[in-house]
Image: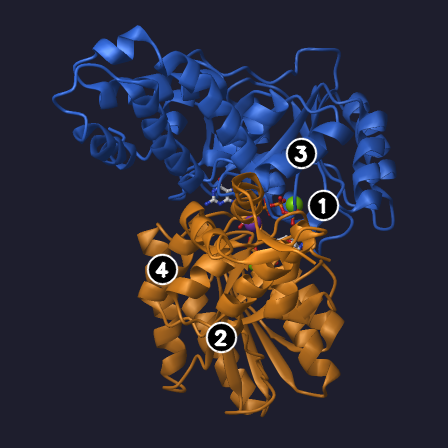
Chain colours: A orange, B blue
Amino acid sequence: FTKEKLDAAALAELEDALVTSDMGASAAARIASALADQRFSREDNQTEAREALAAEVARILKPREATLDLSAGPKPRIVLVIGVNGSGKTTTIGKLSKLLTDAQAKVVIGAADTFRAAAIEQLQVWAQRTGASFVSSHQGADAAGIAFETVKRAKAENADVALIDTAGRLQNKTELMAELSKIVRSIRKIDEDAPHETLLVLDATVGQNALSQVESFRSVTDITGLVMTKLDGTAKGGVLVALAQRHAIPIHFVGVGEKAEDLRPFDATAFARALVGLG
Amino acid sequence: MFEALSERLGGVFDKLTGRGALSEADVDAALREVRVALLEADVALPVVKDFIAKVRVEAVGENVIKAVKPGQQVIKIVHDALVETLGGDGPPEGLRVNGEPPNVIMMAGLQGSGKTTTTAKLALRLTKTDKRRVLMASLDTRRPAAMEQLATLGKSIGVDVLPIVAGQTPQEIAKRALTTARQSGHDVLILDTAGRTTLDDEMMSEASSIAQIAKPGETLLVADSLTGQDAVETAKRFHERLPLTGLVLTRADGDGRGGAALSMRAVTGLPIKFLGMGERAEALEPFDARRIAGRILGQ
Ligand SMILES: Nc1nc2c(ncn2[C@@H]2O[C@H](COP(=O)(O)OP(=O)(O)OP(=O)(O)O)[C@@H](O)[C@H]2O)c(=O)[nH]1
Ligand SMILES: Nc1nc2c(ncn2[C@@H]2O[C@H](COP(=O)(O)OP(=O)(O)OP(=O)(O)O)[C@@H](O)[C@H]2O)c(=O)[nH]1
Ligand SMILES: [K+]
Ligand SMILES: [Mg+2]
Ligand SMILES: [Mg+2]
């Protein structure tokens, strides 16, 4: 079979596919241009080119693919879940709790979102559903205080994991970001290595602002891993590619629905294929 | 103003100093920079393409060629076109709540976009500013504590909320809400619905059936102003399944560039009625096309 280079229109089409995944214009241009010198069979160059594109995207993401086994390591393993409003923090905690309690781990969940209406009740439902202990106070209570109590309870109950939910906060709100530092400081009074994991939850529908989210949250606290939610919708979450190129932060999980079992380990290859439209 | 784009265009036009007029090639070079700027602001690609084509027609004109500062001139053309696409200079359209009571407002959107919070914001505004009697009802039977969330918000702003009855379907709740509103003399009924992805056919059908029952005079798509390229797909698909009358963009208090506003407005032609500017019930502002245009251009 004859192999030939893609013409300009075919290349532009591939670049467009990358742009519409939310990868950002410059990353898309760079990745697409990597295909300019490659040769593909004339019979099915579109599929072949997409395969090559997926491979290129996967190559960038692969170093960030990292499973998170919370049942091992320090006990209790203290996990802080952070992110902007509505990204899926509380639901992700429910899903993580399910994963852990199914594996017979003992889990304590702490409701340190004391701001949003019924945030506590929402999390309590998840704790009940998944058989986790639950630490909470009333709306308006001090978030750092709840986080502290949660860690204390996890120690007292000899729990394997403490999952601490926090209120959604936009990264440009200085007081709210300061509150996050305060939460971290308060749990360090009990365990100076805590939190052992700080998971930033990103919503796949968000575009380039996810870059600013990572940068700002990172400037107030160490982010140990990323979770991307809502990949069961039409959004492709391509901003992870731009993130992978800028930050060496592992990507642990993706959310693919609203149910307890809708959490998957991040799979760079599968993600890259979905991103370029290969099933 | 518009530093991000100004700098870019500065770079393009600097190379032209000493030459008299702008050629089509010069305009195209400038518009390539505009394209990147719009993409960086999260305007969706198909919308960017249409927009650039439209601006090009205007930019390849005498005015630009004779302008002293062609960069500024191009920015002005782009800015004006953005304002126009976003809905123009006038005040945004008000809510359609002046029919036979109860006037129903239905809220719809993706998960976590801000529907419940915006329901309370609209209720507060209609109650305080417009002296209307508002009833809110949650049709979200799925998200844990969704109904408690609305009930709590209702209590804190002093607006009536339909009592929770466990086990009812969203359609049944919609009917009960209509009956209650009629009997108790509420003239506006706001229906908060569960979040849904547009690929979930069952949930999209549920949304249409709610609209058929409640016959809302106003159906608002509530979307996150931080939305990226997905804005087009989401807006299009909701618009296909619901009698949408307007858009609300939330989290405009963030540091996002807000390109989703342009994308959603362009694909649906619907007015953007409000911007969510915070988590509190007071944090709702009428949409301002000029301000968002400035933001998209990185002012
Ligand atoms: N389709 C889909 N929906 C999700 C996913 N994860 C969370 N959600 C939904 O997104 C909405 C917001 O989720 P939450 O877990 O409440 O988000 P949050 O970050 O805790 O929100 P705040 O506490 O208000 O900042 C809910 O309706 C969830 O059911 C996901 O992976 N897919
Ligand atoms: N900063 C900011 N936060 C907002 C705004 N609007 C809503 N939120 C927050 O976004 C999160 C989600 O809001 P909700 O009103 O629960 O969203 P929803 O669309 O009802 O979510 P689901 O019912 O789960 O689909 C909450 O933390 C809200 O406080 C806004 O304009 N600015
Ligand atoms: K996306
Ligand atoms: Mg939450
Ligand atoms: Mg809601």
Ligand 4, seen in the image, is in the quarter at bottom right
Which residue position holds label 4? Answer: A215
| Chain bearing mark 4 | A
Question: Same chain for marks 2 and 4?
Answer: yes
Which residue position holds label 2? Answer: A63
Circles 2 and 3: CB distance less than 8 Å?
no
Report x, y in % for residue B162.
74, 37
Residue lying farthest to the top in this orientation? B62
Q: Is residue A162 left or right of residue B172?
A: left
Mark 2 and mark 3: Cα distance apart in space: 53 Å
The label nearer to you, 4 versus 1, is 4
Circles 3 and 1: CB distance less than 8 Å?
no
Callout 4 amino acid: Glu
Looking at the rendered structure, which numbered label has been put on residue B160?
3
Q: Nearer the viewer, residue B59 or B285?
A: B59
Which residue position holds label 1? Answer: B196
Mark 4 and mark 3: Cα distance apart in space: 41 Å
Residue A142 visible here: no
The crowding category of the residue bearing disc 3, from other C-alpha atoms within 10 Å (few below 14, some 14 to 19, many at least 20), is some
Q: Secondary structure at mark 1?
A: loop
Report x, y in % for residue A150.
52, 78
Q: Is residue A177 left or right of residue B1?
A: right
The crowding category of the residue bearing disc 4, from other C-alpha atoms within 10 Å (few below 14, some 14 to 19, many at least 20), is some
| Disc 2 residue lies near ligand 3 with CB under 8 A | no
Report x, y in % for residue B88.
45, 14
Q: Residue placed at 24% from the left, 28% from the top? A: B1
Please tell me which of labels 3 and 1 falls first in the chain: 3
Q: Residue placed at 59% from the left, 28% from the top? A: B247
Callout 2 amino acid: Pro
